[in-house]
Amino acid sequence: MKTNHIKPTMLWIGIAMALASAFTYAAESHMAEALKHAEAAATATDSKTTAEHAELAKTHATAANEHLDAGITSLNDAIDHAKLKHTDLAKTSAEEAVTHLKAAQ
């Protein structure tokens, strides 16, 4: 009887991708939130509200930037794996890039 074995590395990558996807879709995108709070800061009528919204905008913009950086890293990994003919790993890295780039939007 033949049994199928899942490589532990691929299993962990799958789990990580599932979790990343869940977090991405669980909240509005970081860029949308950053823009919403930046607009609120720009139209606020007092300094306290302006500062509060500016801080929130900065937090979301920073998170978007981190996702963008991670997306670029994943794209570089996809390119490197593809050049080595590691198709499955290249596709996994590309999927990670998609998740990060969507989160950065």
Image (cartoon, rainbow, N blue to C red):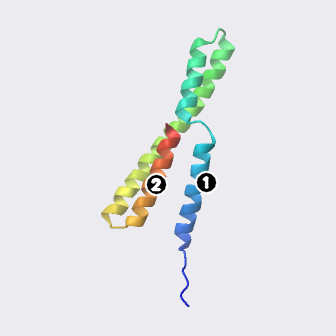
Q: Tell me: residue 54, above or below residue 19.
A: above
Which quarter of the picture shows residue 12? bottom right
The residue pinned by badge 1 equals 19
Q: Residue furthest top?
A: 45
Left of 68 or right of it: where is 58?
right
Percent of width and height locating residue 13: 54, 62
Distance between the Cα atoms at labels 1 and 2? 13 Å
The quadrant holding residue 93 is bottom left
Q: Is residue 9 above or below residue 56?
A: below
Q: Which residue type does callout 1 highlight?
A: Leu
Compared across the picture, whether 46 is left or right of 13 comes to right
* Residue located farthest toward the front when viewing the structure as drawn: 1
Q: In this picture, is 48 found above or below 5?
A: above
- x, y (%) of residue 34? 56, 28
Q: Position of residue 104 (x, y in %)?
A: 50, 39
The quadrant of the picture occupied by the N terminus is bottom right
Number of numbered discs? 2
Picture layout, residue 9 above or below residue 92: below
Q: Nearer the viewer, residue 28 or 84?
A: 28
Identify the residue under disc 2: 95
Left or right, 98 with respect to 19, comes to left
Other residues around mark 1 within 10 Å, as few (<14) / some (14–19) / many (≥20): few
| Amino acid marked by disc 2 | Glu
Residue 76: x and y in percent read 38, 53
Which residue is drawn at the image coordinates 33% and 67% (left, top)?
85
Q: Which secondary structure lies at badge 1? A: helix
Q: Secondary structure at mark 2?
A: helix
